Image (cartoon, rainbow, N blue to C red):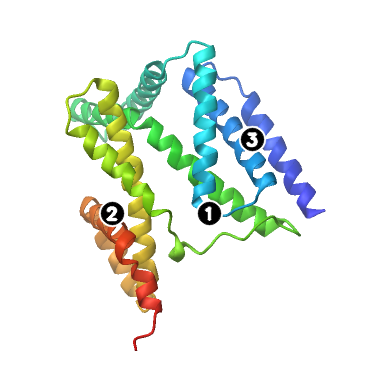
Amino acid sequence: MREWLCVAGSLAWTLIWLLQPDTSLVGQVVRASAVLLTGAFLAMTVYRPSADLSRALLATGAAALALASWTGVFGISWAAVSHGFERELWASNRTFVDQLSAAGTAAGGAGPLLDQLSAAASATAALLPALLVLAALAGLRLGWSWHHRIAVKPLGEPPARFQAFAFSDQLVWLLVAGLALTLVPQAPGWRAAAQNLLALGGALYAIRGLAVFSAGSGRLSRAGCALLTLVAMFLLPFVVGGLTLLGVADTWLDFRRRRATPAT
């Protein structure tokens, strides 16, 4: 009974979300992406259940190909989607700055703040493909976890703990391809591809590095973890860079296996 209640609730929420009036191009693309991703993952899961990240990546790739076909049929260019996303971000930032100005918080500094937010919006819009892929992977991981929490007889194996997060060593080629594209003369399209490959690969390896660190920090007290979290907030760029390097190094050194292997 609990399973069917959850299914009914999920379907109702999904229909409400899909049927909401939204004339923006970005909203339509995001909704189409969600539908295609869900269909691809369900089809693959019914055929052969798997909790591996490679399955989520394969489903995301299939959804991306289907989305490319869908946008091609309707004559939608990715540049138009990216520009629409940037405009929506800029409008949100403008509303935020106006509210701060009305409250007197940003008096005299609204112009520079808006310029900074506009630059951030442009950078974020350029990374929209990587952000969509990361959101898809996170959504599939969360959905698989809830499936094993709710279902009486769930399909496949339950997801591994975060400390065991890993993926195929071949994904290091995402970083290699991204770096290679930055070293050759290129058109704006190739530059955007390089940025998204580096962002996607960097994010995955940073998460892997965090999993390695989490697996090795089991002896830290709660106070120690809280202190490290506080320090990381002020040194975020350096922390993310360090975690990314740790994740890349784990590709060859496999720190968690070494730690689990008893010394002889």
Q: Nearer the viewer, residue 253 or 105?
A: 253
Image quadrant in which you'd find residue 111: top left
Disc 3 element:
helix
| On-image quarter of the C terminus | bottom left
Q: Position of residue 225 (x, y in %)?
A: 34, 70
Amino acid at dot 3: Gly
Residue under pointer 3 = 39
- Residue at the image point whose x is 69% and y is 55% from the top: 155
Mark count = 3
Q: Position of residue 46 (x, y in %)?
A: 69, 45
Q: Which badge, 1 or 3, is on the more N-terminal residue?
A: 3
The reply to whether callout 1 and callout 3 are in contact (CB within 8 Å) is: no
Q: Is residue 24 visible?
A: no
Q: CA distance from mark 2 to mark 1?
A: 21 Å
Disc 2 element:
helix
Residue under pointer 2 = 244
240, above or below 37, in the image: below
Q: Alpha-carbon neighbours of circle 1 within 10 Å: few (<14), some, or many (≥20)?
A: some
Residue under pointer 1 = 52
Q: Is 50 on the left or on the right of 12, as rendered?
A: left
Q: Position of residue 49 (x, y in %)?
A: 64, 51
Amino acid at dot 2: Thr
Q: Which badge, 2 or 3, is on the more N-terminal residue?
A: 3
Q: Which mark is residue 233?
A: none
Q: Nearer the viewer, residue 39 or 176?
A: 176
